[in-house]
Amino acid sequence: MTSSDTALGGRILKVDHAGEQGAVNIYRAQILAARFTAPARVPELCEFKSHEEQHRVVFATKS
């Protein structure tokens, strides 16, 4: 593997990590809104958010 391949891989991981960051924040906002509009959906949204947080941990350890 060349250094440019390694650099590209690092950039891809950073983009993936940023996407996970965004997803966690979107779920956080959806949970807040769902507390008022669809309380039955809050546990499911919390599970989704937790799943994305696990992805974030994986990407953070790879970069």
Image (cartoon, rainbow, N blue to C red):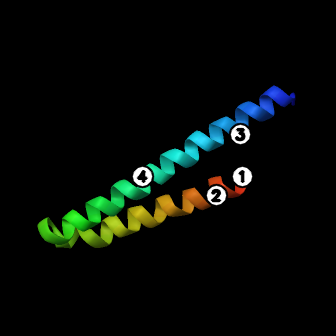
The residue wearing badge 2 is 58
Q: CA distance from mark 4 to mark 2?
A: 14 Å
First-in-chain label (4 vs 3) = 3
Answer left or right for 36 relative to 13.
left
Asked if disc 1 and disc 2 are in contact, CB closer than 8 Å, the reply is: yes
Residue at x 12%, y 65% (from the top left corner): 37
Residue 58's spot in the image, x, y percent? 64, 57
Q: Which type of secondary structure does the marked residue at label 4 adopt?
A: helix
The residue wearing badge 3 is 10
Decide: is 43 above or below 7.
Answer: below
Q: Which type of secondary structure does the marked residue at label 1 adopt?
A: helix
Residue 12's spot in the image, x, y percent? 64, 36
Disc number for residue 23 = 4
Q: Amino acid at mark 4?
A: Ala
Mark 1, residues whose alpha carbon is within 10 Å: few (<14), some, or many (≥20)?
A: few
Mark nearest the camera among 2 and 3 is 3
Q: Amino acid at mark 2?
A: Val
Asked if disc 4 and disc 3 are in contact, CB closer than 8 Å, the reply is: no
